[in-house]
């Protein structure tokens, strides 16, 4: 199912229900008026999950779709903000064909490749754990180059988040 493409004509009650579904169940609807508010800034490839996707800057998770949301100021190779944070849905429009669908099956030692501004950054997973949605510490800056990714633990259940942390192991220009 999809939401109407023009949210401005939608009643306040319908908008509230739409946002509640997105937040409570991690359901992302195809909402063109919101989806246009995103810019591709990079891409990800996770060999162990045989998955890839786009990394975008956006102001809201609504309309994110299958893309991954770049959160905060961290960028690969940045010497000040070293924690690159990516958030994404596990399921979009009832499809499991999204990059973070199988994120909870990642293990220590798995590699993640980020293409960012013409440079390929390779990270290696060193930690996985379940956190609450209110645990904002996972987005704090880190002393070393780190990649933090998170999604819902279970499809259609936003009660907790599955987080993966990886450190930078290689940079290829």
Image (cartoon, grey):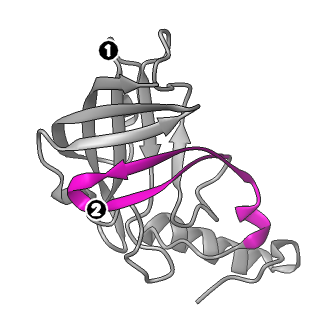
Where is residue 45 shown, x and y percent of the image? 37, 50
User: What residue sits 63% from the left and 85% below the top?
Assistant: 2
Where is residue 82 shown, x and y percent of the image? 42, 19
Tell me the crowding category of disc 1: few under 14, some 14 to 19, or many 20 or more residues within 10 angstroms, Cα based.
Answer: few
Name which of mark 1 and mark 2 comes first in the sequence: 2
Q: Which mark is on residue 144?
A: 1
Judge depth for marks 1 and 2 and give the one in front. 2
Q: Which mark is on residue 50?
A: 2
Where is residue 95 shown, x and y percent of the image? 43, 81
Q: Which mark is on residue 81?
A: none
Residue 148 on the magenta span: no
Q: Secondary structure at mark 2?
A: loop
Residue 46 on the magenta span: yes
Q: Is residue 109 above or below residue 27?
A: above
Q: Is residue 99 above or below residue 85?
A: below
Q: How many marks?
A: 2
Where is residue 159 shown, x and y percent of the image? 32, 61
User: What residue sits 78% from the left and 79% below the top?
Assistant: 5
Question: What secondary structure do most residues of the magenta stretch adopt?
Answer: strand
Tell me the crowding category of disc 2: few under 14, some 14 to 19, or many 20 or more residues within 10 angstroms, Cα based.
Answer: few
Location of the N terminus (image quadrant): bottom right
Per the rendered image, the range of residues in magenta is: 32-58
User: What residue sits 29% from the left and 33% below the top?
Assistant: 123
Examine the image and state in which quarter residue 111 appears. top left
Q: Is residue 97 above or below residue 52?
A: below
Instruction: Quote the CA–CA distance across marks 1 and 2.
Output: 27 Å
Determine the residue located farthest toward the left in the rendered image: 108
Q: Is residue 13 left or right of residue 162?
A: right
User: What residue sits 51% from the left and 26% below the top?
Assistant: 75
Q: Is residue 7 left or right of residue 42?
A: right
């Amino acid at each position: 199912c999809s939401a109407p493409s023009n949210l401005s004509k939608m009643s306040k009650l319908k908008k509230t229900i739409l946002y509640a579904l997105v937040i409570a169940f991690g359901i992302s609807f195809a909402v063109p008026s919101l989806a246009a508010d995103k810019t591709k800034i990079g891409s990800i490839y996770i060999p162990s999950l045989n998955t890839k996707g786009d990394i975008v800057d956006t102001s809201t998770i609504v309309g994110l779709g299958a893309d991954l949301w770049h959160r905060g100021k961290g960028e690969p190779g940045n010497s000040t903000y070293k924690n690159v944070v990516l958030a994404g849905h596990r399921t979009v429009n009832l499809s499991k064909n999204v990059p973070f669908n199988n994120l909870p099956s990642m293990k220590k030692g798995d590699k993640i490749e980020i293409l960012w501004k013409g440079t390929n950054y390779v990270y290696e997973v060193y930690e996985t754990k379940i956190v609450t949605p209110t645990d904002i510490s996972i987005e704090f800056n880190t002393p070393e180059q780190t990649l933090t990714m998170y999604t819902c633990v279970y499809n259609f259940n936003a009660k907790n988040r599955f987080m993966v942390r990886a450190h930078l192991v290689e940079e290829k220009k």
